[in-house]
Amino acid sequence: MERVAISQAMQDYLKAIYKLHEQKGQAPTSALAEMLGVAPASVTNMCKKLAELHLVAYEPYQGVKFTPAGQKLALEI
């Protein structure tokens, strides 16, 4: 798989998703917004971008889950 260049903001989201999964077993967008200090709409937009890069699986009202590639990248940063 080709290495994807991601922004610092994307890295921050991946780290937050990882932390929430470790702590709670899930990563609801509301918890991400609170953890990162951003609006829920901002989280939704970023989750859609990360999903386009195949790093997360995002379903509205279901939260965010890593894909295998996203999990690997999150562990590297």
Image: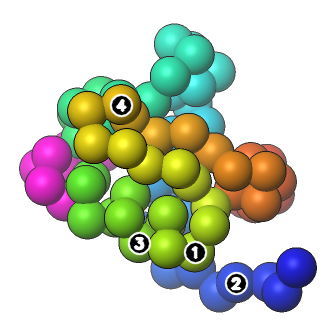
Q: Is residue 77 left or right of residue 21?
A: right
Q: Does the residue at mark 1 contact the one at mark 3 (Cβ under 8 Å)?
A: yes
Disc 3 or 4, which lies upstream in sequence? 3
Q: Secondary structure at mark 4?
A: loop
Q: Please provide percent x and percent y for residue 45.
A: 26, 65
Left/right placement of residue 10 relative to residue 63 reads right
Sequence-wise, the earlier of marks 2 and 1 is 2
Which of the numbered marks, if any, corresponds to residue 6?
none
* Of residues 39 and 26, the one drawn nearer to the viewer in this rendering: 26
Residue under pointer 1: 53
Q: CA distance from mark 4 to mark 1?
A: 19 Å
Residue 65 x, y percent position in the rendering: 56, 39
Q: Nearer the viewer, mark 4 or mark 2?
A: 4
The residue located at (36%, 31%) in the rendering is: 62
**Which residue carries the number 2 mark?**
4
Q: Nearer the viewer, residue 60 or 49?
A: 60
* Residue receiving disc 4: 62
| Distance between the alpha carbons at the discs numbered 3 and 4 | 16 Å
Mark 3 or mark 4, whichever is nearer to me: 4
**Residue where numbered disc 3 is placed:** 49
Q: How many marks?
A: 4
Upstream in the sequence, badge 2 or badge 3? Answer: 2
Q: Is residue 27 visible?
A: yes
Q: Kindly report the distance in space between the C-alpha atoms of the residues bearing marks 2 and 3.
A: 12 Å
Verify whether residue 41 appears in magenta.
Answer: yes
